[in-house]
């Protein structure tokens, strides 16, 4: 399940912006609110409104995405325009051109098949390869926000996450935040990835984004990735200047693990060791009771692993926002405390699609 939340802060690059804020009395619209016990909001029909496409991995990277992106040219352009506008607010529009210029230079350092796929979707749509690369790496540094793996009383696992991108360079211009979330909502798609004529894995992404934001490999595992504040730039800038592909972008990592790991343990091992550009939280669910884990990653290291724990009264779920296990969340962005309180209000007995959607 996936829902698009509002009013959450989950970008890596906007740390500097917080200095413009003053602490208000209370948090107003940003305060936590638990809807457990309120009328149910989950509507399976609405989930069916997100279109589903097939990407055939046996088909050449030159063509495998084209049938999707050609349907979304207008919407992709609108999403890029919002980014341009948001960047423009800070840097008079120059930053956008600089970013696209860098991305155009960097695309040849992106590993296959993603490089060819980027050129191909640029060809198919007439949108520049630099802009597509920016769009793909933009999500690299702004993946949020809250992910939960929870186990019901029968040991059945559920994996829930929300997504909010309205906060890349600025967050306090509510109109822009809303505008960007809306433009992205129009790009939301489900993709069935097929290999050897069979479904291999299923992912949720945005048209034009070649990775998976949330994925499921049947009878194996589920995965979502949350942004972690920290060190993307020290590895990203040398890459932009010099190229090289020893490290993995999250967008590749998610798709690669979906494609290659056959079970929960293989996925966990891979996600704990793959060298990354940035920091991230991988939220991984399995098929067996107790298979729920949060892997806190730095570029070279696994800094922390939190697992479901049958001996702990709250060990029937794991929950991750965009803050480390041992650090207090930013005062205006504490989604963890309300998230945990709301999970505990829900109780394990009420874990299902509807219950988690209320959380
Ligand atoms: C993109 O189009 C150019 C010119 O038509 C062509 O040479 C190139 O092979 C295409 N690239 C991809 C990846 O489709
Ligand atoms: C990661 O490893 C590289 C090369 O081994 C090193 O230069 C870099 O400082 C390390 N980064 C961190 C955050 O430890
Ligand atoms: C599981 O929970 C129990 C009770 O809170 C605790 O003592 C134990 O250390 C936990 N185990 C792990 C691996 O965290």
Image (cartoon, rainbow, N blue to C red):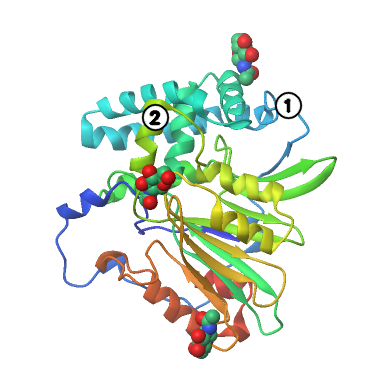
What residue is rendered at 39% in x and 38% in y? Answer: 236
Residue appearing at x 21%, y 29% in the figure: 92
Residue 327: x and y in percent read 32, 70
Q: Is residue 343 above or below residue 68?
A: below
- In percent of width and height, residue 210 lies at 58, 37
Let me know if residue 280 appears in the view. Answer: yes
SS class, disc 1: loop
> Taking 259 as reference, is 23 above or below it?
below
The mark nearer the N terminus, 1 or 2, is: 1
- Where does label 2 land, which residue? 240
Res. 179 in view: no
The residue shown at (54%, 41%) is 187
The quadrant the N terminus occupies is bottom right
Mark 2 crowd level (few <14, some 14–19, many ≥20, 10 Å Cα): some
Ligand 1 is found in which quarter of the picture?
A: top right
218 relative to 342 in the view: left or right? right
Element at badge 2?
A: helix
In the rendered structure, find residue 60 and report the number of the disc placed on it.
Answer: 1
Side of 148 where 6 appears, left or right: left
Of tags 1 and 2, which is closer to the observer?
2
């Amino acid at each position: 399940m996936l829902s698009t939340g509002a009013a959450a802060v989950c970008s890596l690059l906007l740390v500097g912006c917080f200095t413009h804020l003053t602490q208000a009395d209370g948090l107003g619209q940003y305060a936590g609110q638990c809807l457990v016990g309120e009328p149910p909001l989950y509507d399976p029909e609405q989930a069916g409104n997100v279109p589903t496409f097939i990407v055939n991995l046996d088909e050449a990277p030159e063509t495998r995405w084209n049938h999707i992106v050609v349907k979304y040219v207008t919407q992709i352009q609108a999403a890029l325009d919002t980014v341009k506008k948001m960047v423009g607010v800070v840097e008079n529009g120059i930053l956008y051109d600089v970013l696209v210029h860098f991305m155009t230079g960097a695309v040849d350092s992106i590993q296959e098949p993603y490089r060819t796929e980027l050129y191909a979707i640029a060809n198919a749509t007439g949108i520049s390869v630099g802009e597509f690369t920016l769009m793909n790496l933009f999500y690299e540094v702004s993946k949020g926000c809250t992910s939960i793996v929870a186990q019901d009383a029968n040991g059945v696992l559920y994996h829930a996450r929300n997504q909010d991108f309205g906060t890349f360079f600025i967050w306090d211009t509510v109109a822009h935040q809303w505008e960007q979330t809306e433009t992205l909502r129009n790009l939301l798609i489900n993709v069935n990835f097929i290999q050897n004529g069979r479904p291999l894995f299923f992912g949720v992404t945005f048209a034009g984004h070649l990775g998976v934001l949330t994925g499921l490999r049947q009878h194996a595992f589920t995965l979502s990735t949350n942004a972690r504040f920290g060190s993307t730039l020290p590895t990203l800038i040398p890459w932009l200047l010099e190229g090289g592909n020893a490290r993995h972008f999250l967008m590749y990592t998610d798709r690669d693990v979906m494609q290659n790991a056959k079970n929960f343990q293989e996925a966990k091992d891979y996600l704990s060791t793959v060298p990354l550009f940035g920091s991230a939280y991988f939220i991984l669910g399995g098929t067996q009771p107790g298979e729920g884990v949060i892997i806190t990653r730095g570029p070279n290291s696994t800094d922390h692993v939190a697992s479901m724990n049958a001996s702990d009264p709250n060990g029937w779920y794991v929950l991750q926002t965009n803050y480390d296990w041992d650090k207090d969340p930013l005062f205006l962005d504490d989604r963890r405390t309300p998230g945990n309180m709301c999970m505990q209000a829900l109780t394990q007995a009420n874990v299902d699609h509807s219950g988690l959607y209320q959380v």
